[in-house]
């Protein structure tokens, strides 16, 4: 056994595909930050013991260290204890979870929401609840791994379509004779940062009587006036609920978003028509056979939803940083290009795995940490630095990243 795995591991390392974990902790504990050190909150970490300015997290609004979220978790731990003790369907569903679900549904403008302890669990559980043998799933080639795993587990026939190719999707839908048809897509693509054309997808789904599931892991909190996500970005829902043009047309939509990224805590939810949500609750095995997330997580999330809506300046600042980074990268005349992106995900395409790792190391030497993303997470030959911006970053910190990138051109 040892010889076998040593051989396999050596092969991974030779292909520059071996991954390494780092130990990461805030440089200064959030509870101990002085007012003068605010720029460190959610931006500066000890990474393997070394202080680094980080552009690696998905903490897009900088909420993971927000004092109000921390206090909510502490108070809930004092009220409920730290563990949920059972599956939500047994005795793990608390008043905190119930209130969270109602607030999530209200926020995204859909009738009902169901909270899962992780986004991975939501997708891997919901898709097999929705479709099975005899059904067909139409999946974008760049979809997140957990959507792909959910599709595999469902045993529905799987059609993987070229990225964002509506014509290819239309012809696949047209020729399908499956009983149920489910189109599945990232709403914001996790390694590219671009936004799916949800109105066009919904219209196609209407034409061919298909359902649409969108995974808004990187849009929820970031896009929309109050952080409602991709549906709001596209004007499908607004401050007054479903927009007039979309009234009565969302019953084929399954909305999913995660809560460990912009919301800063953990978990995910699916939302949509009450009977669909009820069915997923009854059937998703990752919901039924897993211990619920602790109530302190739910209470911390309720605080996060409040901050997301009350502090729109976080999103405005994020957009300032996006423009600053794009201008800084252009001005530096780097041999690499940023993919066009309206979101916090700003991928800098490097090319080979080896080069991406080398650039990451040269940034690291300058105190700046940006993760290199390699195949199989992204297509061969498109290894990249996935720069992820956060509302916690200052303009000066983004300038520091741009200077470090200019230095890293060797
Ligand atoms: C991160 C992510 C998930 C998984 O969510 P977790 O809560 O981290 O398990 C699902 N879908 C997409 C698109 C993601 O980026």
Image: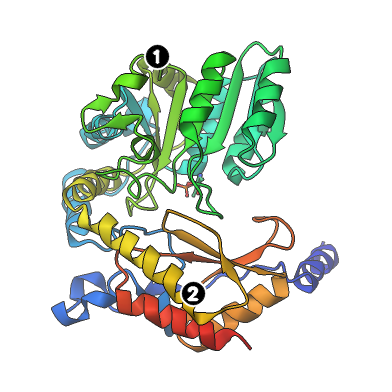
- Please tell me which of labels 1 and 2 falls first in the chain: 1
Quadrant of the rendered image containing residue 315: bottom left
Question: What residue is at 26 percent from the left and 76 percent from the top?
Answer: 39
Question: What residue is at 35 percent from the left and 50 percent from the top?
Answer: 222
Q: Quadrant of the N terminus?
A: bottom right
- In the image, taking residue 253 as reference, residue 210 lies left or right, namely right
Q: Position of residue 64 (x, y in %)?
A: 31, 60
Q: Position of residue 267 (x, y in %)?
A: 39, 44
User: Is 62 above or below relative to 409?
Assistant: above
Quadrant of the rendered image containing residue 166: top right
| Residue, disc 2 | 329
User: Is 271 above or below relative to 67?
Assistant: above
Q: Is residue 355 visible?
A: yes
**Looking at the image, do the residues carrying marks 1 and 2 touch, with CB atoms under 8 Å apart?**
no
Q: Quadrant of the C terminus?
A: bottom right
Q: Which mark is residue 275?
A: 1
Query: In what element is the residue under mark 1?
Result: helix
Q: Position of residue 285 (x, y in %)?
A: 52, 28
Query: In what element is the residue under mark 2?
Result: helix
Name the residue nearer the viewer: 257 or 382. 382
Q: Position of residue 336 (x, y in %)?
A: 61, 72
Quadrant of the rendered image containing residue 59: bottom left
- In the image, taking residue 345 as reference, residue 140 lies left or right, namely right
User: Is 252 above or below relative to 238?
Assistant: above
Q: Determine whether the beta carbon of the residue marked 2 sits less than 8 angstroms from the nearest atom of ligand 1.
A: no
User: Few, some or many C-alpha atoms within 10 Å of disc 1 (few <14, some 14-19, many ≥20)?
Assistant: few
- In the image, taking residue 262 as reference, residue 136 lies left or right, namely right
User: Few, some or many C-alpha atoms within 10 Å of disc 2 (few <14, some 14-19, many ≥20)?
Assistant: many
């Amino acid at each position: 056994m040892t010889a076998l795995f040593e051989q396999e591991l050596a092969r991974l390392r030779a292909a520059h595909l071996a991954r390494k974990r780092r130990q990461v902790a805030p440089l200064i504990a959030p509870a101990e930050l002085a007012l003068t050190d605010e720029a460190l909150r959610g931006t500066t970490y000890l990474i393997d013991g070394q202080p680094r300015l980080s552009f690696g997290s998905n903490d897009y609004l900088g909420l993971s260290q927000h004092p109000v979220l921390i206090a909510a978790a502490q108070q809930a731990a004092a009220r409920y204890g730290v563990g949920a003790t059972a599956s939500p369907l047994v005795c793990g569903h608390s008043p905190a979870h119930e209130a969270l679900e109602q607030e999530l549904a209200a926020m995204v403008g859909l009738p009902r929401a169901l909270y899962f302890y992780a986004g991975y669990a939501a997708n891997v559980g919901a898709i097999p609840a929705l479709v099975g043998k005899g059904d067909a799933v139409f999946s974008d080639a760049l979809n997140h791994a957990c959507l792909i795993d959910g599709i595999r587990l469902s045993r529905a026939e799987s059609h993987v379509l070229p990225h964002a190719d509506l014509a290819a999707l239309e012809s696949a839908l047209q020729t399908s004779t499956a009983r149920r048809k489910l189109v599945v897509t990232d709403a914001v693509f996790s390694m590219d940062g671009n936004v799916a054309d949800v109105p066009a997808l919904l219209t196609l789904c209407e034409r061919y009587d298909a359902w649409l599931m969108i995974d808004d892991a990187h849009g929820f909190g970031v896009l929309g006036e109050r952080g409602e996500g991709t549906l709001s970005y596209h004007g499908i829902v607004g401050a007054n609920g479903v927009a007039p043009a979309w009234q009565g047309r969302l019953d084929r939509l399954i909305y999913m978003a995660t809560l460990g990224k912009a919301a800063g805590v953990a978990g995910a939810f699916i939302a949509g028509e009450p009977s669909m949500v009820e069915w997923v609750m009854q059937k998703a095995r990752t919901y039924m056979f897993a211990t619920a997330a602790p109530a302190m997580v739910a209470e911390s999330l309720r605080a996060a939803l409040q901050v997301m809506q009350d502090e729109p300046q976080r999103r405005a600042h994020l957009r300032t940083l996006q423009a600053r980074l794009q201008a800084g990268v252009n001005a530096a005349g780097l041999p690499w290009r940023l993919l066009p992106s309206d979101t916090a995900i700003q991928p800098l395409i490097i090319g080979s795995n080896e080069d991406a790792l080398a650039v990451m190391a040269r940034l690291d030497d300058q105190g700046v940490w940006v993760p290199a993303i390699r195949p199989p997470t992204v297509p061969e030959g498109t290894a990249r630095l996935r720069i992820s911006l956060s509302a916690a970053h200052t303009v000066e910190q983004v300038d520091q990243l741009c200077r470090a990138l200019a230095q890293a051109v060797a």
